Amino acid sequence: MIGQKINTLKELEAAAQMRQSVTVPGTTFDKPRPAAFVMNLQGHIIYRLFLKGMFVYVKESKPKGPKPMTWQVKEKSCQN
């Protein structure tokens, strides 16, 4: 899920300090990557990622509720 757009190195640094992940849709960075990792890329690569649109990754929350039963109890038969 896509969050806030990152436009500057200062915003990218803030995301790295908060240990957030970033994503750039439509590129090899479409999967979440740590912002600190992206900060250590070469400048021309970061510039291209900014142009394509870099966003903070927000993990989708799963709905809370009863969990489905995935196991069944087998009955034991007693034979004397």
Image (cartoon, rainbow, N blue to C red):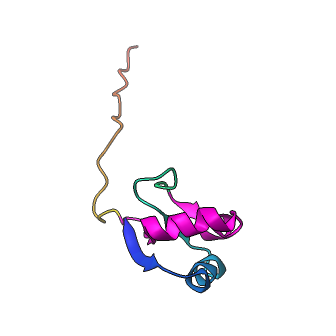
Vertical arrangement, residue 71 with respect to residue 48, above or below = above
Q: Residue farthest to the top? A: 80
At a point 29% along the width and 48% down the height, the residue shown is 68
Quadrant for residue 41, please give it. Answer: bottom right
Quadrant for residue 40, please give it. Answer: bottom right
Vertical arrangement, residue 51 with respect to residue 18, above or below = above
Q: Residue farthest to the front? A: 44
At a point 36% along the width and 66% down the height, the residue shown is 61
Question: Residue 53, how many percent across, how many down?
Answer: 43, 68
Question: Residue 77, how many percent across, how many down?
Answer: 35, 21
Vertical arrangement, residue 9 with respect to residue 33, above or below = below
Number of numbered markers = 0
> Which image quarter is the N terminus in?
bottom left
Magenta span covers which residues?
32-61
Vertical arrangement, residue 17 with respect to residue 70, above or below = below
Residue 45 as seen in the image, left or right of residue 74: right
Quadrant for residue 64, please give it. Answer: bottom left
Question: Residue 76, how many percent across, how many down?
Answer: 37, 25
Residue 17 as seen in the image, left or right of residue 48: right
> Which image quarter is the C terminus in?
top left
At a point 58% along the width and 78% down the height, the residue shown is 12
Can residue 45 be found in the magenta stretch? yes
For this rendering, which residue is in front, 26 or 16?
26
